[in-house]
Image (cartoon, rainbow, N blue to C red):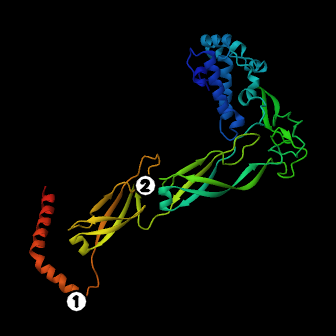
């Protein structure tokens, strides 16, 4: 099978610079290296193809020969890749040695022992409708990992100190070199003696048993601002799990769950409620008491009020989170039809019906005419 064009293999233009070729090679080598694609079919062949292309194009002299003669090379016998890989050279291309592939990719045994940020925590808090509206202060109990006070997080007993692991010299990992037809490859694995920590605690702290951290139930006082809603999230900086090796702690995220109210509903920063009134109050008008978040207030129901009529109470809604005032409360009237009337009450209503019959019929006709006009366009 004929070989693909080396420029096509690396995905670069024919006038690409040496730095562009180097960058493309590193990217593809990371992706197709056999150790990273043990279960991928064809990864080894693809990696070999990439290595060949980089070996030729990464050297100015070989690249010039390839541009002129193609895969056949200057002598018509192709390029001697065994010689290329044996010498681990990319010439003046600046690749720093093909055999140092793993060092180039993974840092050649960099230490793993260093500061590490603690994990974030989540706390779910239930609140009443009014608590969410006006804010509240709560004391919550949060189980979390904290730095050990006895050893200051070192894991070593007071008066002692951790020692550098003699097996990995504090790197936390062991590198093993292997010579292959492609050059020298270096495989890295965690140090078994220090378990990748890079240090050894010979005399563990009796409080944390060498872990450097302990599990505690912490009481936290927190303030919930006015105007929060269901699924609102509060962040408490630095109140999460303790960091490792001097790293900063994580954060605590408090998720709000608001219990529905029996009378009020919320729509943004508006409060909605339904006010039942009697047939007589709606017909004749009246002053009625209305519950609000601040207590009871009085509103005037005018004569002839119908079910569905809404009244607005300005500034009686939910406070805005940014402190810019409050929303309104909308009071929706629902006229209650009387039930279980006695004979006297029924007779009064019959008399009312006889007296208002013609007027009601006229209003009814006008209502049906509006409906007819709406449908007829």
Q: Position of residue 109 (x, y in %)?
A: 79, 31
Q: Quadrant of the N terminus?
A: top right
Task: Name the residue rendered at 61%, 55% in the picture.
Answer: 123
Which quadrant of the view contains residue 333? bottom left
Q: Nearer the viewer, residue 41 or 165?
A: 165
Whichever of labels 1 and 2 marks the residue nearer the N terminus, that label is 2
User: On residue 318, which mark appears?
Assistant: 2
Q: Position of residue 305 (x, y in %)?
A: 23, 67
Vertically, is 347 above or below 236? below
Q: Quadrant of the C terminus?
A: bottom left
Which quadrant of the view contains residue 342? bottom left
Q: Position of residue 118 (x, y in %)?
A: 69, 45
Q: Nearer the viewer, residue 148 or 17?
A: 148
Q: Residues within 10 Å of mark 2 (few under 14, many from 20)?
A: many
User: On residue 343, which mark appears?
Assistant: 1
Task: Name the residue rendered at 90%, 43% in the picture.
Answer: 159
């Amino acid at each position: 099978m004929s070989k693909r064009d080396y420029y096509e293999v690396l995905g670069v233009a024919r006038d690409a610079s040496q730095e562009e070729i180097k960058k493309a090679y590193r990217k593809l080598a990371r992706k197709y290296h056999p150790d990273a694609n043990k279960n991928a079919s064809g990864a080894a062949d693809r990696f070999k193809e990439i290595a060949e292309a980089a070996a030729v194009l990464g050297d100015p002299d070989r690249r010039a020969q390839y541009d002129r003669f193609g895969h056949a090379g200057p002598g018509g016998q192709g390029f001697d890749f065994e010689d290329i890989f044996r010498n681990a050279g990319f010439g003046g291309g600046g690749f720093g040695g093909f055999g140092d592939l793993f060092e180039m990719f993974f840092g050649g045994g960099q230490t793993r022992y260093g500061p590490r940020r603690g994990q974030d925590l989540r706390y779910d808090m239930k609140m009443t409708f009014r608590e969410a509206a006006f804010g509240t202060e709560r004391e919550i109990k949060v189980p979390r990992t904290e730095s050990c006070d006895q050893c200051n997080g070192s894991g070593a007993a007071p008066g002692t100190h951790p020692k550098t692991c003699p097996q990995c010299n504090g790197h936390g990992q062991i590198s093993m070199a292997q010579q292959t037809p492609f050059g020298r490859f270096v495989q890295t694995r965690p140090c078994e003696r220090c378990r990748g920590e890079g240090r050894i605690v010979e005399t563990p702290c009796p409080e944390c048993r060498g872990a450097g951290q302990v599990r505690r139930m912490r009481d936290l006082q927190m303030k919930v601002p006015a105007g929060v809603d269901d699924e609102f999230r509060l962040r408490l900086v630095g109140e999460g799990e303790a960091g490792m090796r001097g790293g900063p702690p994580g954060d605590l995220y408090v998720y709000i769950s608001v219990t529905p109210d029996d009378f009020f509903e919320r729509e943004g920063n508006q409060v909605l409620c339904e006010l039942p009134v009697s047939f007589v109050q709606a017909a004749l008008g009246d002053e009625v008491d209305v519950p609000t978040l601040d207590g009871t207030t009085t509103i005037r129901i005018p004569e002839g009020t119908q079910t569905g009529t809404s009244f607005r109470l300005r500034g009686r809604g939910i406070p805005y989170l940014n402190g810019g005032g409050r929303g309104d409360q909308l009071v929706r009237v629902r006229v209650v039809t009387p039930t279980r009337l006695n004979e006297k009450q029924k007779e009064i209503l019959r008399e009312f019906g006889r007296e208002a019959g013609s007027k009601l019929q006229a209003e009814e006709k006008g209502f049906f005419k509006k409906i007819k006009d709406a449908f007829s366009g």
